[in-house]
Amino acid sequence: MPLAVTTRYDYIDEKGDTSFSKIRVPNGFSIAQYLEFAVAMAQLIATMVLTRITSVSITFSISLSGLTLKTVVGAVADIAQKGYFSFQTTTNGFFKRFRIPTFDEDKINAGTDDVNTLDADVAAFVTAMESGIAVTGGTVQPCDERQHNIQSLTDAREVFRRHR
């Protein structure tokens, strides 16, 4: 069974605090129809709030039930322990930073906070981020918010942060 599509509305208040709300809608519409819905709903919400709507996003969820993903959380999993990756984009001076929560301590070089980029799993991830993933009809290339393609890894280390 397909999962509902999510539209997310992000807000900022006078103090700079942020929040968001989500509205889920059924599957079966075109991307253009979802965009039209999200823009119209943002306009309706904007008339009811004192904050500023800073962005609207649309998320298409997929079922992972057919995959062989982990089904049990590791005994020492800690959401604050993150793998931090920084990538240079194809536009000079722009970077994409990415954090993966509950990063596996075994993929950190002993005695350091450096991610072992020679580890097969880490290397595969870095390659996919730098070169994209081949799909039917082309390659999907990760990019930053400005659509600058990710080009090369500049930093990979372990960080401890509760949020983000």
Image: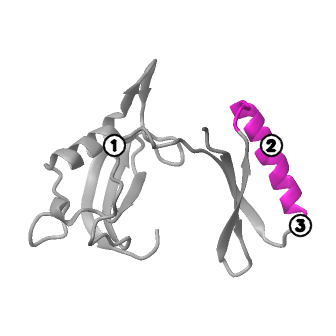
Q: Please name the residue that numbered disc 3 is placed on.
A: 48
Of labels 1 and 3, the one closer to you = 1
Residue 38, how many percent across, how many down?
A: 77, 47
Residue 41, how many percent across, how many down?
A: 83, 51
Question: In the visual, does 108 lie left or right of 50?
Answer: left
Q: CA distance from mark 1 to mark 3?
A: 44 Å
Quadrant assignment for the N terminus = top right
Three-letter amino acid code at the position of disc 3: Met
Q: Is residue 160 magenta?
A: no
Q: CA distance from mark 3 to mark 2?
A: 17 Å
Q: Please name the residue that numbered disc 1 is placed on.
A: 68
At x 40%, y 53%, the residue is 95
Q: Residue furthest left?
A: 110
At x 88%, y 56%, the residue is 44
Of labels 1 and 2, the one closer to you = 1
The kind of secondary structure element at disc 2 is helix
Residue 55, how many percent across, how many down?
A: 68, 56
Write down the region rendered in magenta: 27-47
Other residues around mark 3 within 10 Å, as few (<14) / some (14–19) / many (≥20): few
Relative height, residue 141 to residue 119 (above, below): above
At x 22%, y 47%, the residue is 121
- Report the front residue among 74 and 141: 74
At x 32%, y 34%, the residue is 131
Three-letter amino acid code at the position of disc 1: Thr
Mark toward the start of the polypeptide (3 vs 2): 2
Q: Main secondary structure of the magenta part?
A: helix
Three-letter amino acid code at the position of disc 2: Phe
Q: Please name the residue that numbered disc 2 is placed on.
A: 37
CB atoms at circles 3 and 2 under 8 Å apart?
no
Residue 150, how many percent across, how many down?
A: 38, 42
